[in-house]
C-alpha cells in the first residue's frame, strides 16, 4: 500500500484520496479537523501521535505562547481538554527524547526562538533538580527547585493512549 504524505493543509473542502490497491477514503479537510496519517505519525488540529507509541501529545496553536511557572504545570495539564480528552499530564524527559524529538519536524509547533525549553515531570531527588528538555537540540537543562519560580518555560502536555 502506498502512503500519502500530507503537509499542513488549511482548506475548507472535502477530498477523496485513493490509494493503490485500496478502497477510496473520504477525508474531511475542513479547518484541519480530520485525522491526517502518514508513515510515521498521525495528527489532528490539536494533537500529535507517533505511530506505534502509546502517547498523544498536545500540538495546538496555544503552544506557541504557552509558558508556565513550575508551580502551575501540573494544574495546567490536568485541566487541559483537547479532542474530548481530559487526562493530560506533564511528560517526562525520556518521553520527549524518545517520542517527540525524532518527530519534531512534523509537529505543528515544535519550538521557537522564545519557546524551546520545556518543563518535564522528571525530578532528581539526590540533587534536588528539575529536568528541563530543550527540544531544539535534544539537551537537558537542570534547575534547582529553589530558583525555578523565577522562570517561565514552555509546556506541552501528553496523555497515555
Image: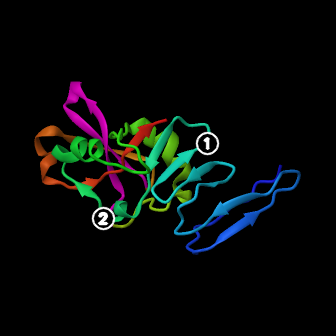
Viewer-side residue, 88 vs 141? 88
**Mark 1 surroundings within 10 Å by alpha-carbon count, few (fewer than 14), some (14 through 19), many (20 or more):** some
Residue 46, placed above or below residue 147: below
* Sequence-first disc among 1 and 2: 1
Which span of residues is magenta-colored? 114-135
**Residue 5, percent from left and from top:** 70, 60
SS at mark 2?
helix
Percent position (x, y) of residue 1?
A: 83, 49
Taking depth in this image into account, of 104 and 42 the one nearest to the observer is 42
**Extreme-right residue of the structure:** 21
> Do the residues under discs 1 and 2 have CB atoms within 8 angstroms?
no
- Cα distance, mark 1 to mark 2? 27 Å
Judge left or right: residue 105 versus residue 25.
left
Residue 43 lies within the magenta run:
no
As drawn, is 27 to the left or to the right of 148?
Answer: right
**Residue at the spot 39% in from the left edge and 65% down from the top edge:** 112
Q: Could you say which quadrant of the image residue 132 lies in?
A: top left
Identify which residue, 45 or 23, lies in the foreground. Answer: 23
Decide whether residue 123 is among the magenta residues: yes
- In percent of width and height, residue 43 lies at 55, 54
The residue under the point 15% across, 38% down is 145
Give the overall secondary structure of the magenta segment.
Answer: strand
Tell how many labels. Answer: 2
The residue indicated by pointer 1 is: 51
Q: What kind of element bears circle 1?
A: loop
Circle 2 Cα neighbour tier, 10 Å, few/some/many (<14 / 14–19 / ≥20):
few
Residue 65 numbered mark, or none:
2
Residue under the image location 49 percent in, 35 percent down: 161
**As drawn, is 14 to the left or to the right of 153?**
right
Q: Residue furthest top?
A: 126
Give the percent coordinates (x, y) of residue 80: 31, 48
Amino acid at each position: 500500500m502506498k502512503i500519502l504524505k500530507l503537509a499542513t493543509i488549511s482548506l475548507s473542502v472535502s477530498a477523496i484520496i485513493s490509494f493503490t490497491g485500496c478502497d477510496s477514503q473520504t477525508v474531511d479537510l475542513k479547518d484541519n479537523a480530520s485525522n491526517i496519517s502518514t508513515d510515521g505519525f498521525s495528527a489532528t488540529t490539536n494533537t500529535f501521535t507517533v505511530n506505534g507509541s502509546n502517547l498523544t501529545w498536545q500540538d495546538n496553536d496555544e503552544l506557541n505562547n504557552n509558558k508556565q511557572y513550575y508551580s502551575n504545570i501540573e494544574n495546567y495539564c490536568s485541566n487541559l481538554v483537547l479532542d474530548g480528552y481530559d487526562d493530560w499530564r506533564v511528560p517526562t524527559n525520556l518521553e520527549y527524547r524518545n517520542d517527540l524529538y525524532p518527530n519534531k519536524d512534523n509537529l505543528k509547533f515544535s519550538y521557537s526562538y522564545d519557546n524551546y525549553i520545556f518543563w518535564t515531570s522528571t525530578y532528581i531527588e539526590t540533587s534536588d533538580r528539575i529536568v528541563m528538555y530543550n527540544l531544539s537540540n535534544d539537551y537537558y537543562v537542570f534547575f534547582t527547585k529553589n530558583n525555578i519560580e523565577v522562570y517561565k518555560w514552555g509546556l506541552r502536555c501528553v496523555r497515555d493512549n
